[in-house]
């Protein structure tokens, strides 16, 4: 049989009548005759779309009035579950979630049936590597499963490092100790807020740092150095706003 042309064929005694029926998805029956070589074919394209999982029957009527019946069915092709490994960023609370489509690498049903996706664990996931199972199901109840690796990364780690580098730069500078301590304190407070996931608070503290540097620019802090620190802090703020 051919699902593309919706045709069923077979062999019988030459000249015998064959009653061919399809039961699913709708019933349809066609009568044909075997040719001189015993070959016959029934074209169901006008009455039914033969799909995998469909079944039917062929009845051969010979010249003596005897009937031979053969049931037939078209197997449903197994589903193919395809997974992909992903890397995702943790949220402000250090956790992450996924949906089935995130790890689907192109799962499909060779029969063309619609499919649904499900995952045995959608999260929350802590920072690190986690393994989950994706299950693909079709409308006939068939299923297939594959495994994917979900890697959760800490997005604020590079920002914390950048903040620490700015702190070290201030500590190594030759500016007045009182101003140095005040600037470092603001940045350490900002770093603490980042680590706790309080992004808005961190930005406000870095803005306060910028304002203090700007106030001492070309006074207690060399102009070039002040401009460098202000720009450095602005880069940190941009990183935080892009989270």
Image: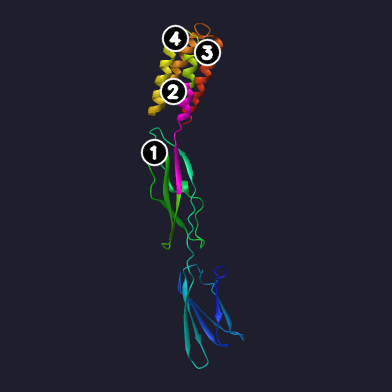
Can residue 184 be seen from the camera position used here? yes
Q: What is the magenta range?
A: 148-164
- Answer whether labels 3 and 2 touch (C-beta < 8 Å): no
Residue assigned mark 1: 126
Does the residue at mark 1 contact the one at mark 3 (Cβ under 8 Å)? Answer: no
Give the residue displayed 46% in from the left and 48% down from the top: 148
Mark closest to the chain's N terminus, 4 or 2: 4
Tell me which numbered mark, 1 or 2, is placed earlier along the sequence: 1
* Residue 186 in the image: above or below residue 52: above
User: Residue 165: image x %, image y %?
Assistant: 49, 21
Q: Is residue 186 above or below residue 161?
A: above
Q: Secondary structure at mark 1?
A: loop
Residue most extreme to the bottom: 64
> Which residue is located at x 56 percent, y 12 percent?
224
State the scheme by which the image is colored: rainbow
Report how far apart the C-alphas of labels 1 and 2 lie in the structure: 25 Å
Residue at label 4?
Answer: 179
Q: Earlier in the sequence, mark 3 or mark 2?
A: 2
Q: Answer whether residue 152 is magenta in the image.
A: yes
**Residue count near mark 1 (Cα–Cα under 10 Å), binned few <14, some 14–19, many ≥20:** some
- The one nearer the camera, 211 or 18, is 211
Label 1 and label 3: CA atoms lie apart by: 39 Å
Q: Residue at x 50, y 17 (%)?
A: 169
Q: Which mark is residue 226?
A: 3
Label 3 SS:
helix
**Residue bearing the label numbered 2:** 203
């Amino acid at each position: 049989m051919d699902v593309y042309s919706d045709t069923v064929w077979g062999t019988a005694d030459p000249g015998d009548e064959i009653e061919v029926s399809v039961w699913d998805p709708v019933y349809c029956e066609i009568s044909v005759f075997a040719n001189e070589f015993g070959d016959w074919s029934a074209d169901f394209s006008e009455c039914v779309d033969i799909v995998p999982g469909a079944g039917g029957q062929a009845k051969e009527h010979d010249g003596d009035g005897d009937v031979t019946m053969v049931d037939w069915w078209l197997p449903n092709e197994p589903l193919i579950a395809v997974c992909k490994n992903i890397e995702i960023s943790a949220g402000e609370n250090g956790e992450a979630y996924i949906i089935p489509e995130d790890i689907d690498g192109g799962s499909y049903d060779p029969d063309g049936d619609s499919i649904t996706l499900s995952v045995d664990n959608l999260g929350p996931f802590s920072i690190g590597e986690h393994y989950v199972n994706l299950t693909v199901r079709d409308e006939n109840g068939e299923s297939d499963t594959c495994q994917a690796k979900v890697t959760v990364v800490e997005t604020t780690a590079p920002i914390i490092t950048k903040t620490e580098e700015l702190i070290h730069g201030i500590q190594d500078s030759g500016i007045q100790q009182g101003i140095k301590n005040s600037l470092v304190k603001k940045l350490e407070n900002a770093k603490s807020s980042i680590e706790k996931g309080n992004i808005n608070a961190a930005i406000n503290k870095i803005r306060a740092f910028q304002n203090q540097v700007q106030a001492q620019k070309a006074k207690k802090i060399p102009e070039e150095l002040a401009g460098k620190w202000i720009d450095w802090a602005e880069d940190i703020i941009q990183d935080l706003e892009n989270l």
